[in-house]
Image: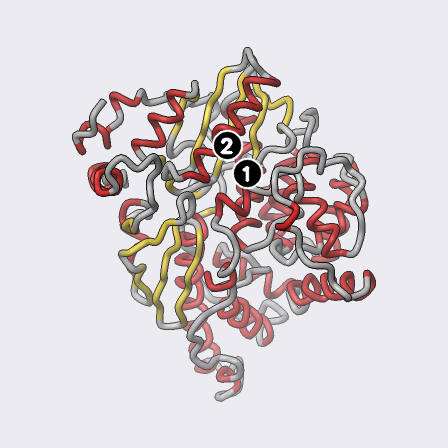
Amino acid sequence: MRPSRTLLGLAVVFCVCAAGDQPYEKPGDLKAADFLDASLLKGPDYDVEEKVVSDGIFNTYTINSKFGIWKVQGTNVAAIRVHEVGAIGKLKEVDKIAVAAGGVAKGALNVGKGAVAVVTHPVETISGLPDGIGRLFGRIGRGAGRAGEKMGTVDTTGTESENLSDPKDASPPSEQSTAGKTVTASGELAKDLIGVNSAMRSWAKKLQVDPYTRNEILHNELRDVAQYDAGGQFAVNIAPGGIILTALSTTSTVNDLIWMKEPDELVTLNEKRLTEMGVSPTVSKAFRLNAQYNLTRQVRLIASLNELPGAAGRAGFVARAAGAKTDSDGEFYMESAMLADLFNKTQAPVSAIVDNLPGACVIAGDNRFACLFPLDYIYWTEGVAGHVDRITKRAETDYPKATREMWLTGRASERTARELAARGWSLREKSLKLISEEVQPPSKPQPTPAVPVEKRPDAEKAGVAK
């Protein structure tokens, strides 16, 4: 489905015109249908609310279902949650079949299955924090240090050489001991791993879902079904849903790791790969024990970086990722690593991930400076303007001969497109898709051409002045 550019274009025009000569745009409410395929908007057990709230770069979706209400940040996360709702419904049907077949005692299925109003990681968990642009772009260079502070350790990787935030932003010191912090972080990781046995992973594979999901309802359903099918004797023909998170050629390998390997094997593999990338023990521990990364996110992020063995800057990327403060931050860094992998495979060889910049800005091919951002819809806010100027200055100073490219999984407003063009950036929207039913990328590079401002569909249909 191709989203309606007309509605988004009109929304942007309205925001700009209503504000008179205001120098910046103000994020407005968007529509889910402009970002999610029609097949994802409504199903037998759920519907996605039409209104989508934007913070300037990320969309927040509300998913109402028979099993609970999800408020999630990020279009890809919303698609995954919708897929998970379908998986929950199928597991509930398995429950009924198991009871009818005598596979489990009647009444046992009611344990832990009461109505849930709001599920794990509601959007409220980010209240009181800066918006996405402030969190992810405003503390560049401080990620590892922040994570190290949480662990009660001091980072020595040098990633704080470019401190772009005010000292007053620093978190107040905690009286908890270093050992106490480590135990707390380790406990969060342990909660993700407890009970995720081979039977649970097997059912997750049947449904094409994450066995280490933070979706509490899905986790409980997987656990319960696995408990009475621990020996794999309960045969049910389940047709999994359609979506797969990533179009990487490494998808099958990564999925096999997640579904087939024991958790402790994955933990050991992650630690080994991080060491081989030159990540310091302090940063490695801070990243692996950061509660914003479940085991699946860790595996995907590290596996993607592992596909760039000759690229400089991977250790610095992990250091920045280690400072994730919310669930959507963790998703952003995981998807950024996946985009770098995908860009390397389908566009141009990546030689470096540029340090002290948000996400994955890479040097690739014949002197290309490409920022690969898994963002939903970019308004030209004051924060966005400041950070685009900062990234532009970095490109002009350190890579003056490189072409500047911005690749988005989502889209940008007409105003943002004009401002980027004025600063010498070519914009590629809805490129490098991470949600797909296709596991393998095209055999040959399929570059997405930049769309000149004057030929952008939203500009033409909305009547934006050129």
Disc number placed over residue 336 in the picture, else none: 1
Identify the residue shown where x is 62% and y is 44%.
Answer: 166
Is disc 2 surrounded by few (<14), some (14 to 19) or many (20+) residues within 10 Å? many
Does 305 sit left or right of 53 as displayed? right
Disc number placed over residue 270 in the picture, else none: none
**Is 60 rendered above or below residue 109?**
above
Q: Which residue is mark 2?
A: 372
Quarter-of-image position of residue 199: bottom right
Q: Nearer the viewer, residue 76 or 20?
A: 20
> Amino acid under label 2?
Leu
Q: Quadrant of the N terminus?
A: top left
Q: Earlier in the sequence, mark 1 or mark 2?
A: 1
**Total marks drawn?**
2
Q: Quadrant of the C terminus?
A: top left
Does 452 sit left or right of 392 as displayed? left
CB atoms of marks 1 and 2 within 8 Å: yes
Secondary structure category for the residue under label 1: helix
Q: Nearer the viewer, residue 75 or 238?
A: 75
Give how far across and how far down residue 405 sits, in percent.
46, 23
Give how far across and how far down residue 450 sits, in percent.
37, 21
